[in-house]
């Protein structure tokens, strides 16, 4: 199993002010927690070093050997990227979560889905409705799939491809309900009734006040009687 390598530094300053100073220095604050750690470990990391540690295909499912420098020595952990907060405009990493793992124990990760082929239902005028683009699986780190390729060529209008239809590799199990749909092929929506045309709508509009007027007149006559 190939692993990325990353060196981070432990940090002892917290809050918005220190976080801004770290970012001004080109560093990203973060936290590391999980296997082998008694309590969460606050860290700072270079975003460039983090990107370099991630496999371009596996991305956040990359297993990383993390060396933590704390001023008194170093600590080595095996971890994965659990989460990364991205600035919505600058698209820069603002905070990272690393989770330390035991490589002999199963982990829960999300794996992307790639659809291949052109569905028969689409050829017949249907619409391909993609419900899930990633699915959660449970397996040991060395067995994490890069992706799941699903051939939708034989998918006809009305057909559904469920998680249970995936041929999972040995040692890999779904972490979601097997009944969940991944992709469906649906018929194009039919017009929900033709509706009233402009002339009909105008006639209906003109008739409504007249009906109310007649109804009021009838009530007045009844009152006189």
Image (cartoon, rainbow, N blue to C red):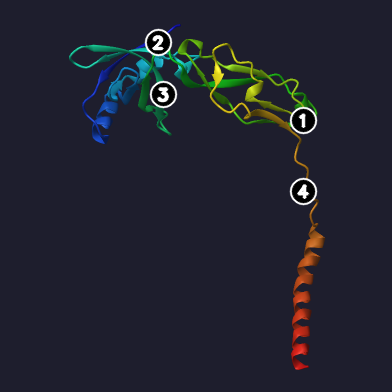
Quarter-wise, where is residue 216 in the image?
bottom right
Q: How many marks can you see?
A: 4
Where residue 64 sits in the image (x, y, percent)?
39, 13
Disc 3 or 2, which lies upstream in sequence?
2
Disc 4 or 3, which lies upstream in sequence?
3
Residue assigned mark 2: 4
Left or right, 181 with reference to 21? right
Quarter-wise, where is residue 10 in the image?
top left
Residue in the foreground of this view, choosing between 139 and 198: 139
In front: label 4 or label 3: 3
> Distance of mark 4 from mark 3, alpha carbons?
46 Å
Residue assigned mark 4: 192
Give the residue furthest to the bottom: 225
Disc 3 or 1, which lies upstream in sequence?
3
Left or right, 120 with reference to 20? right
> Distance of mark 3 from mark 2, alpha carbons?
15 Å
> Distance of mark 2 from mark 4, alpha carbons?
56 Å
Left or right, 77 with reference to 195? left
Work out which quarter of the rendered image holds the C terminus and state it. bottom right
Residue in the foreground of this view, choosing between 89 and 182: 182
Quarter-wise, where is residue 174 in the image?
top right
| 49 relative to 19, above or below | above
Residue at left offset 41%, top offset 26%: 83
Left or right, 90 with reference to 30? right
- Callout 4: 10 Å neighbours few (<14), some, many (20+)? few
Residue assigned mark 3: 82
Q: Given contact means CB atoms under 8 Å apart, are the residues at marks 1 and 4 in contact?
A: no
Where residue 108 sits in the image (x, y, percent)?
47, 21
Q: Given contact means CB atoms under 8 Å apart, are the residues at marks 2 and 4 in contact?
A: no
Q: Given contact means CB atoms under 8 Å apart, are the residues at marks 2 and 1 in contact?
A: no
Residue assigned mark 1: 157
Residue at left offset 78%, top offset 75%: 211
């Amino acid at each position: 199993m190939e692993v990325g390598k990353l060196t981070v530094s432990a940090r002892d300053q917290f809050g918005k002010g220190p976080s801004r100073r770290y970012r001004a220095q080109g560093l990203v604050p973060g936290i590391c927690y999980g296997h082998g750690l008694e309590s969460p470990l606050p860290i700072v990391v270079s975003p460039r070093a983090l990107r370099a540690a991630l496999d371009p295909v596996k991305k956040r499912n990359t297993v990383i050997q993390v060396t933590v420098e704390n001023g008194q020595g170093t600590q080595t952990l095996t971890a994965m990227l659990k989460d990364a907060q991205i600035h919505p405009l600058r698209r820069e990493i603002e905070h990272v979560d690393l989770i330390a793992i035991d490589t002999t124990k199963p982990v829960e990760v999300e794996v992307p889905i790639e659809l291949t082929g052109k569905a028969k239902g689409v050829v017949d005028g249907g619409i391909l409705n993609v419900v899930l683009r990633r699915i959660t699986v449970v397996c040991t780190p060395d067995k994490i799939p890069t992706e799941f390729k699903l051939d939708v060529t034989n998918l006809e209008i009305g057909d559904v491809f469920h998680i249970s239809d995936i041929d999972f590799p040995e040692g890999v199990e779904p972490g979601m309900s097997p009944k969940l749909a991944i992709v469906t092929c649906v018929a194009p929506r039919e017009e929900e009734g033709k509706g009233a045309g402009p002339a009909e709508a105008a006639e209906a509009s003109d008739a409504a006040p007249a009906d109310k007027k007649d109804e009021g007149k009838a009530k007045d006559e009844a009152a006189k009687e």
